[in-house]
Image (tube, grey):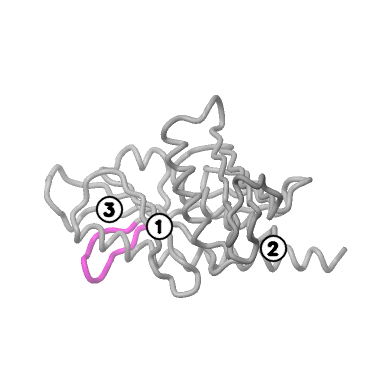
Amino acid sequence: MIMKDDMHDEVVEQPTSKFQCEMNALKNTDGSAFYSQGETSVMVAVYGPGDLKETKQEIDKALVEVDFRPKLGSPTVNEKYLERFVQGVCENAIMLSLHPRTAFAIIVQIMQDQGSLLSCAINAVCVALQDAGVSMKYLPVAVTVALKKESESEIEDATDVLIINPAIKEECESFSILTFVFDSVNKNLLCTHSQGPLLPKQHERCLKAAKEATEEVLKFFRDSVTQKVAAGLEL
């Protein structure tokens, strides 16, 4: 679906695919989730808070360890960078001071990467943390936005197309890809991962579109938790 932004008159292309999620997808974990966003899917396992070697313990908080695993082979530099990014998001969202001298281990297994991988991974981790009942200050909500041109102009153009949660083909056609992470409470921007050149006004439009798209993700989070609770009551 394509929409017009009234203020800037650029085209915003909304995703046609929906989110899917299965909580408690793995046995022998404290929390887990299989999460798909379009054709991209991720499996997340959460363990903790658990024991930690005394030499690694923090006296006032828990540690967060994230293991970001590719579909095949060993992690590359790119996966290691995404691993650190996801770890930072988790460290800020989890109430670590409630669990001093312990650690949370989060395993992110890429099942299929067909675009918007980072936002899919962050949202999958969020759902898995909810499944584990981890106390959090807020839920981190991630949205990827790609920006591509419909003309050959090298300057900012009102016909620039904003694509929400793009597929991999759309990412390849775009000159800039951004992943925004917001908090679920006030929808404040927490952090941004960006690839490609971008003018300040283009960034503002991408940010606005991403912030509006968080509503659909949050609704999906709420529906997933409601379904899990309802299923538990039926047992």
Q: Nearer the viewer, residue 23 or 5?
A: 23
Most distant residue in the top direction:
73
The kind of residue tagged 1 is: Gln
**Circle nearer the N terminus (2, 1):** 1
The kind of residue tagged 2 is: Gly
Residue 73 placement: quadrant: top right
Q: Give the residues drawn in magenta, as a range.
A: 1-12
Q: Position of residue 55 (x, y in %)?
A: 61, 45
Residue on which the image places disc 3 = 161
Binning the other alpha carbons within 10 Å of mark 2 as few (below 14), some (14 to 19) or many (20 upward) gives few
**Magenta segment includes 196:** no
Q: Position of residue 68 (x, y in %)?
A: 54, 39
Question: Which marked residue is nearer to the observer: mark 2 or mark 3?
Answer: 2
Q: Position of residue 229 (x, y in %)?
A: 75, 67
Q: Residue at x 40, y 52 (%)?
A: 144
Residue on which the image places disc 2 = 133
